[in-house]
Amino acid sequence: MKPQIFSLKFGINTCYIIKGEGTIMIDGGPSKAREKFKKYLIQYSINPNEIKLVVLTHADFDHSGSAGAIREITGAKIAVHENDRAILEEGRFNFPPGVTAWGKISHAIFEPLLKKIPIPPQKADIILNNEDYPLSDFGIDGRIIYTPGHTAGHVSVLMDNGDLFAGCLAHNIRLFTPGPRLPIYAEDIEQIKKSWKLVIDQGATMIYPGHGKPFHIDSIIKYL
Ligand SMILES: [Zn+2]
Ligand SMILES: [Zn+2]
């Protein structure tokens, strides 16, 4: 059975619900996304209790701010990589530095504004490490793979059919880039290129980024 994919947009962030035999969610959106999340569940006819897991691609405020609220609504577990755990659990503001000209400028513009948004500390339920984490127990034909670079604890979800839920391994939103590109913010851009090689080797084809629309991997290969 081909899994169904539902997009949930929260401002500039896109989270995804993947429904195979079981149902999981990719990323928890920014703070204060609770009401909009509930509306999406109604819109997509998804029973809150179906969602058993929220995989945080990383713990930056815009990807994790409502994870705790989503757990309250659904009962899902929250999974985060051990290297990003403290950011999540301390409610720490984390915004990787700009690595392109616009990345640097926009970082300087956005940071003082974004810093004011309160971030709730949220406990993780599942701590990921550098090993693949199979999702079969959650009824999903895929696995979580460690793809560091944007943050030290960045992960992606690679489905057996080649769909890759890539968080900030790429950006594809006008505010950031004119098309699918490497992210404009990163702790280690060279590491990101290594992570891309890994996911390409493992068969990634369609990319579902945390910012912007899905795209085929061919459109990013030239930037690696
Ligand atoms: Zn980020
Ligand atoms: Zn982000």
Image (spheres, rainbow, N blue to C red):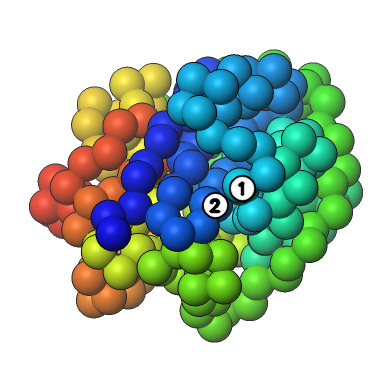
Q: Nearer the viewer, residue 94 or 112?
A: 94
Circle 1: is it few (<14), some (14-19), or many (20+) Cα within 10 Å? many
Upstream in sequence: badge 2 or badge 1: 2
> Within the image, what quadrant is residue 53 found in?
bottom right
Circle 1 sits in a helix, a strand or a loop, which is it?
strand
> Within the image, what quadrant is residue 163 found in?
bottom left
> Is residue 70 shown left or right of residue 110?
right
- Residue type, label 1: Ile
The N terminus, quarter of image: bottom left
Image vertical order of residue 51 relative to residue 195, above or below: above
Q: Return the x and y of residue 5 as percentages of the image width and height.
A: 37, 42
Most extreme residue toward the bottom is: 131
Determine whether the beta carbon of the residue marked 1 sits less than 8 angstroms from the nearest atom of ligand 2: no
Where does label 1 land, which residue? 51
- Seen at 57% across and 28% down, the residue is 41
Q: Return the x and y of residue 116 as percentages of the image width and height.
A: 79, 20
Determine whether the beta carbon of the residue marked 2 sits less than 8 angstroms from the nearest atom of ligand 2: no
Circle 2: is it few (<14), some (14-19), or many (20+) Cα within 10 Å? many
> Is residue 103 shown left or right of residue 224?
right
**Separation of marks 2 and 1 at Cα, in angstroms:** 5 Å
Where does label 2 land, which residue? 24
- Seen at 36% across and 30% down, the residue is 212
User: Is residue 98 in view from this perspective?
Assistant: no
Marks 2 and 1 close (CB-CB < 8 Å): yes
Circle 2 sits in a helix, a strand or a loop, which is it?
strand
- Residue type, label 2: Ile
Q: Nearer the viewer, residue 46 or 173?
A: 46
